[in-house]
């Protein structure tokens, strides 16, 4: 199953889409970074905004919430669910989302791995 999960992600990240067909994750992430200006120190916010702006442009698909609860197996076929975050952009945004799901949320509250993913923190990391 692990190979299938990776192969599906590779297929998603190699699928080219037209900008008008789905949201641009870079623009979404930039809005998130700008929103944080009142919550984090100015220099860190400026660094975050620059970091997002410096991500290379890509016209490839990303799921935006790719984790073990959104990839299912049915009758030997792998299925992807929870498509509301489907967008286009650089796969680094996917990696950031995956980091949050598997590691970041549990940094705040250790039991989030079980609550969110249904797996223990040591397995998640």
Image (tube, grey):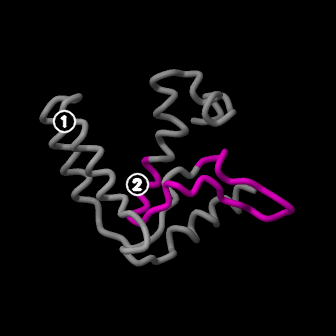
| Badge 1 element | helix
Pick whichever, 28 or 71, lies toward us.
Answer: 28
Q: What is the count of numbered marks? A: 2
Span highlighted in magenta in the image: 67-96
Residue found 84% across the figure and 63% down from its top = 76
Q: Quadrant of residue 40?
A: top left
Picture coordinates of residue 70 (x, y %)?
64, 50
User: Separation of disc 2 and disc 1 at Cα?
Assistant: 20 Å
Residue found 15% across the figure and 42% down from its top = 46
Which quadrant does the N terminus fall into? bottom right
Q: Residues within 10 Å of mark 1 (few under 14, many from 20)?
A: some
- Give the label on residue 93, or none: 2
Residue found 55% across the figure and 38% down from its top = 102
Left-right relation of 40 to 29: left
Q: Is residue 70 magenta?
A: yes
Which quadrant does the C terminus fall into? top right
Picture coordinates of residue 63 (x, y %)?
52, 59
Q: Residue furthest right?
A: 75
Q: Is residue 88 magenta?
A: yes
Left-right relation of 104 to 110: left
Q: Residues within 10 Å of mark 2 (few under 14, many from 20)?
A: many
Q: Quadrant of residue 112?
A: top right
Residue found 28% across the figure and 60% down from its top = 55
- Give the label on residue 115, or none: none
Pick whichever, 84 or 123, lies toward us.
Answer: 84
Contact between marks 2 and 1 (CB within 8 A): the answer is: no
Pick whichever, 91 or 36, lies toward us.
Answer: 36
Picture coordinates of residue 105 (x, y %)?
49, 31
Picture coordinates of residue 97 (x, y %)?
46, 47
Indicate whether 5 appears above or below 109: below
Q: In the rendered structure, which disc, 2 or 1, sits on the residue that comes first in sequence?
A: 1
- Give the label on residue 37, or none: 1
């Amino acid at each position: 199953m692990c190979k299938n999960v990776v192969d599906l992600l590779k297929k998603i990240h190699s699928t080219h889409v037209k900008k008008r067909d789905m949201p641009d994750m870079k623009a979404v992430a930039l809005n998130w970074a700008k929103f944080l200006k009142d919550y984090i120190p100015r220099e860190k916010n400026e660094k975050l905004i620059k970091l997002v702006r410096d991500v290379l442009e890509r016209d490839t698909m990303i799921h935006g919430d790719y984790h073990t609860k959104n990839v299912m197996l049915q009758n030997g076929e792998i299925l992807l669910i929870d498509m509301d975050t489907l967008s286009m952009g650089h796969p680094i945004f996917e990696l950031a989302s995956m980091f949050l799901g598997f590691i970041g949320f549990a940094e705040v509250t250790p039991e989030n791995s079980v609550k969110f993913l249904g797996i223990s923190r040591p397995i998640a990391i």
